Amino acid sequence: GESVGLHLPTLSVQEGDNSIINCAYSNSASDYFIWYKQESGKGPQFIIDIRSNMDKRQGQRVTVLLNKTVKHLSLQIAATQPGDSAVYFCASPWGNNNDMRFGAGTRLTVKP
Amino acid sequence: GAVVSQHPSWVICKSGTSVKIECRSLDFQATTMFWYRQFPKQSLMLMATSNEGSKATYEQGVEKDKFLINHASLTLSTLTVTSAHPEDSSFYICSARFLAGGYEQYFGPGTRLTVT
């Protein structure tokens, strides 16, 4: 079936470094993607989204890149801070109800 | 805006009992609400989609008689775990979509269920 998945389950970076979290998807018809941040014991928090008619979108300290050719997207976090430590999910609407389907998640740990 | 709440935030119940979890959209109307389940160190898995005034649509493998969903109003959906067992212990998260929204879903803070 269609899926949204991640390359790496864990990522550890030094405070102040840039972080890159990757995600692969299988449905070439997917036209909208969202990155969520989930802290321990909390619900997912919207970070940034991108539509398929774009290949890059920037927010505050975050950038999402979309490569439709290889069905890959990434989340870049600039100057990573301890507060960025969390699990990051990519997600995309799927099916008749356009419910959000989540990838496996990457746990980002920021070392001081 | 676009705040979704869940109640309770955590609950402990004994095996064989039932527990109800509420999901509310506080400042918007939601025709569609979604229920997810998340086991430790795993991703969110969709359990069911709930449309106001109609029966919920369950994902394959989710027992509709065990996980009762009621979406009686545009701001409230409930999930009742009936005859709970320890394997039902999980983090349950709801989300809601605007009445006239597109893809965006707004997630609640989750409910931690522990069945002893």
Image (cartoon, rainbow, N blue to C red):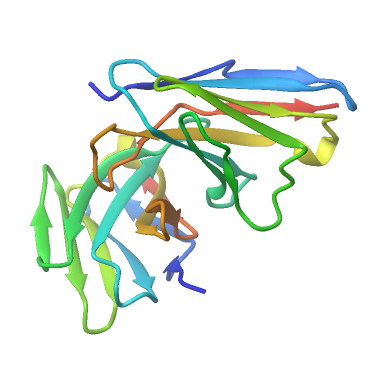
Residue A80 in view: no
Residue A8: percent from left, percent from top = 45, 67
| In front of the other: A70 or A110 | A70
Query: Between A45 and B16, which is closer to the camera in this rendering?
Result: B16
Q: Residue at x 60, y 42 (%)?
A: B37
Q: Position of residue A110 (x, y in %)?
A: 36, 46
Q: Position of residue B52 (x, y in %)?
A: 46, 30
Establish if A3 lies above or below A98.
Answer: below
- Name the image quarter holding the N terminus of chain B: top left
| Image location of residue B32, percent across then percent down | 41, 36
Asked where in the image residue A86 lies, by quadrant, the reply is top left
Q: Residue at x 34, y 39 (%)?
A: B105
Q: Is residue A73 left or right of residue B94?
A: left
Q: Is residue A50 among the parts visible in the rendering?
A: yes
Q: Nearer the viewer, residue A23 or A12?
A: A23
User: In the figure, is residue B95 to the left or right of A57?
Assistant: right
Say which quadrant the C terminus of chain B sits in: top right
Residue A76 drawn above or below residue B86? below
